[in-house]
Amino acid sequence: MNHASAFDMDAFRPHDHGRCRRAARAAAERECQARGLRLTPARAFVLDALLESHRAMTAYELLDRLREAGLGKQPPIVYRALDFLVANGFAHRVERLGAFVGCVHGADDHRAAFLVCRSCRQVAEAVLEAPPAALTAQAEATGFAVERVTVEAEGLCERCRADA
Amino acid sequence: MNHASAFDMDAFRPHDHGRCRRAARAAAERECQARGLRLTPARAFVLDALLESHRAMTAYELLDRLREAGLGKQPPIVYRALDFLVANGFAHRVERLGAFVGCVHGADDHRAAFLVCRSCRQVAEAVLEAPPAALTAQAEATGFAVERVTVEAEGLCERCRADA
DNA sequence: ACGCAACTGTTATATCGTTACATATGAATC
DNA sequence: GATTCATATGTAACGATATAACAGTTGCGT
């Protein structure tokens, strides 16, 4: 389907971001169409804001944008939109930051992992083959049913290291 | 040194918790002794509270305990204690919960991973051989310097599954 | 006893997220 | 078209998590 290499849309690699953004947006639209989900104005607006760059955005940053756009005033509007986007795999929450990024891989989120720059807050999405073996082994051994795995690497991207 | 199996102190396995707790506390004391760190009353109190069980505790739960004990009244006291404990590897922050657990492995925290029960909030600590290969490969490829890796599996422990 | 660094006390505030309930809208059916 | 129900939005109030800033205290080497 897509012959680009795995890191083509990596936040920390030069890439055609317009294409990156449009592809993610189109994938979300297709998915909504296919599954009977409603990409309402507020939801689409939040998704677009997240896809503008690979920088993680907080809920309140997004709320400010919604306010400017006249699409809502109170926190619930943005948290509802984010719940929808995250639940359906169109965005991810970066636990480490309490912030959100658009999903650029369409991967099912059991396999998403992130490189999070602590300086510029840009986030690259990686796709894991599987959760770490040690973790699944211990889960298995103790009867723990894993539902979701969070893998986040915090550090400095090349550019931010150069700036420092 | 320690001939016990890797999961002996797993939160989701029956184990001698008194021994588990005392071992962790003693390890912290030794470490402080060795590195010239001060395990002050507030810090020791918070560590003991965290080691009481394998349940993740929020900063404000801990603050309530500190208040009862007359060791402080305002949030900074507990956040400072937690900063100290986390910085020195005596406790971990569970990002998924915004809460804290005592460290029972003394492992350096680049290698810690967690099984987090979303029902009872008990947390088992696992030790990773290494961060997932896909992640380090992508970091390498893009010049991203990884400083810390968070691996957290959320799910249901055996007991909570049985209860449901 | 002195001086410095580390630690603690206190006030205030920033940041992140939810509850609860009222209202509106879309789309299937009568 | 009117009815109905599920889904989505509007709004006010609040709860939970965390930090800033600065003053005061304590431990400890000299």
Image (cartoon, coloured by chain):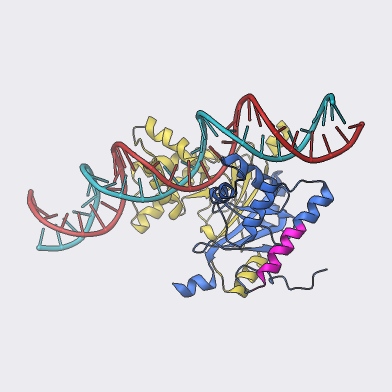
Chain colours: A yellow, B blue, C cyan, D red
Q: Does the segment drawn in magenta span residue A89?
A: no
Residue at x-position 68% and y-position 35%: A160
Image position, residue B163 (x, y; %):
46, 73
Image position, residue B156 (x, y; %):
52, 67
Image position, residue D4 (x, y; %):
15, 58
Q: Return the residue nearer the eye: B86 or C27.
A: B86
Q: Does the segment drawn in magenta span residue B17?
A: yes
What quarter of the picture does the C terminus of chain B occupy? bottom left
Q: Is residue B138 visible from the viewing direction of this image? A: no
Would residue B145 be found to the left or right of residue A22 on screen? right
What quarter of the picture does the N terminus of chain B occupy? bottom right
In the figure, residue D22 lies in which quadrant?
top right
Would residue B118 be found to the left or right of residue B43 on screen? left
Start-end of magenta stretch: B15-27
Q: Return the residue nearer the eye: B15 or A23.
A: B15
Image position, residue A41 (x, y; %):
34, 41
